[in-house]
């Protein structure tokens, strides 16, 4: 591919490449989410997941519980009801 991936153009059109890995694409997509009333919670979840990735190991259990309560459980302050059951399942182990 044009970006060294060798996947015959797959990278250039994938969501991950356009909206996560490319800074301007990420910014524009996040602004889109913020501007859509039904998707603003998705943007907030994204921000919290990025913060979770940066937090110390000792803080992760509490941070994960807060994320589940706020975004993944029905009745949470910013419940993301559009997520699948598999995406919201509590990890085993």
Image: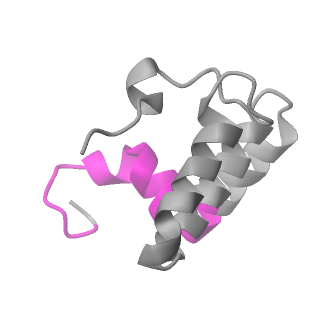
Q: Residue at x 24, y 45 (%)?
A: 93
Q: Is residue 14 left or right of residue 63?
A: left
Q: Quarter of the image for the N terminus: give it.
A: bottom left
Give percent across and percent down for residue 25. 60, 58
Seen from the viewer's position, the closer of residues 13 and 27 is: 27
User: For residue 83, what is the image quadrant?
Assistant: top right
Q: Residue at x 38, y 45 (%)?
A: 14
Give percent across and percent down for residue 34. 81, 46
Q: Is residue 45 above or below residue 56?
A: above
Q: Is residue 87 left or right of residue 31?
A: left
Q: Is residue 84 left or right of residue 11?
A: right
User: For residue 68, what is the image quadrant?
Assistant: top right
Q: Which residues are magenta?
A: 3-26
Give percent across and percent down for residue 24. 63, 66
User: For residue 78, what is the image quadrant?
Assistant: top right
Q: Is residue 58 left or right of residue 32?
A: left
Q: Residue at x 76, y 44 (%)?
A: 32
Seen from the viewer's position, the closer of residues 79 and 34 is: 79
């Amino acid at each position: 591919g044009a970006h060294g991936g060798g996947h015959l153009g797959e990278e250039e059109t994938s969501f991950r490449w356009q909206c996560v890995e490319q800074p301007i694409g990420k910014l524009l997509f996040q602004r889109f989410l913020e501007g859509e009333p039904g998707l603003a919670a998705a943007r907030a979840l994204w921000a919290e997941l990025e913060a979770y990735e940066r937090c110390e190991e000792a803080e992760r259990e509490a941070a994960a519980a807060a994320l589940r309560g706020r975004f993944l459980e029905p009745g949470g302050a910013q419940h993301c009801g559009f997520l699948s059951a598999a995406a919201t399942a509590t990890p085993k182990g």
